[in-house]
Image (tube, helix red, strand yellow):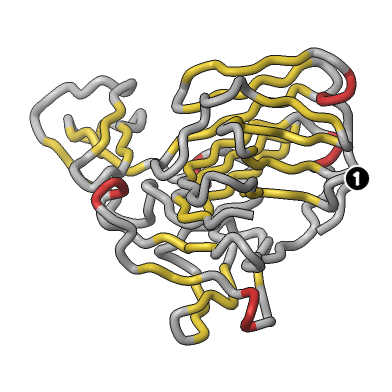
Amino acid sequence: MREIESNLIIIIKMKQIFLAMLLFFSFCTSGQTGVTKYGENISTSVNFVDIYGQIWSVPKLNINGVKVITKFEPTDIAGCKLWLEADAGITLNGSAVSGWADQSGNGNNANQSTVLYQPLFVADGGSAINNQPIIRFDGTDDWLQGTTIPNINTSSMTIFIVVKYNNTNVWGQFFSINNFSNGFWIYNQIEHTLDVKNNNNDEYTSSNTFPASVFNMVSFVKNINISAKAYINGQYKAWANNQDITQSFTNTN
């Protein structure tokens, strides 16, 4: 497996359950709400990104002519089940990560008690992510294990991942549930493709559509038993409507 230096965002919608997972680094960090702008009629549809890469939105609130601007967080979406971000909830063992607390409030934490397998915490992930922290997996044996999230295997889901992978002559996984033969995996292949394995069936993009050594926004949309779609940096890359990739899988951590 290759080294993964990642800014990863995953959002998974499971019918009426919503799993939002920000791994390694989130550009939607906590706090800084209640910023106001006086004397102007700001449209409630406005969204913008500040110089730190943080997303802000204008809610439907008008008190004495004051529009209150708040920053978007995954928990703003009803039913958020999992949210991990590199600037919150990190338990360190020196410079290594032994625990990662779920920010959704559901206690779906990720942990690694074996020192050899603990990924590295990097306080400054570089200018590409506005010098925010990341968690770096070595591509050999680093991994974190989370809890089993009920019903994720039989539900529709939408996943967003921001990730940079290195060492382009090998493959590497970014997110997985259960094992390779009957679970659900998101990973890259040596042909620079984005691959999704669902119950031992594959959906993947064309060669050289998933570049290495740069941060990419990956998204995967699965409408259970109907269709599945994959996107890279907002561009549609692959589609399937067969039962193999859209069916349920075996759910366990």
Q: Is residue 126 left or right of residue 23?
A: left
Which one is nearer the viewer's eye here, 54 or 106?
54
Q: Residue at x 69, y 15 (%)?
A: 239
Question: According to the image, label 1 marks what residue?
Answer: 250
Specify the quadrant that holds the C terminus: bottom right
Question: What secondary structure is marked by label 1?
Answer: loop
Left or right, 27 with reference to 16: left
- Residue 34, horizontal then vertical, whole percent: 26, 48
The residue closer to the viewer here, 215 or 207, is 207
Across and down, in percent, residue 106 comes to: 66, 59
x and y, in percent, of residue 192 in the image: 56, 33
- Residue 233 image position (x, y, % from top left): 45, 27
Query: Which residue occupies 58% across, 49% down?
Result: 21
User: The disc labelled 1 sits on which kind of residue?
Assistant: Thr
Q: Residue furthest left?
A: 39
Q: How many marks?
A: 1
Within-10-Å neighbours for mark 1: few <14, some 14–19, many 20+: some
Judge whether 43 appears above or below 88 on screen.
Answer: above
Q: Quadrant of the N terminus?
A: bottom right
User: Vertical placement of 72 versus 130: above or below?
Assistant: above
- Which of 165/32 is in front? 165
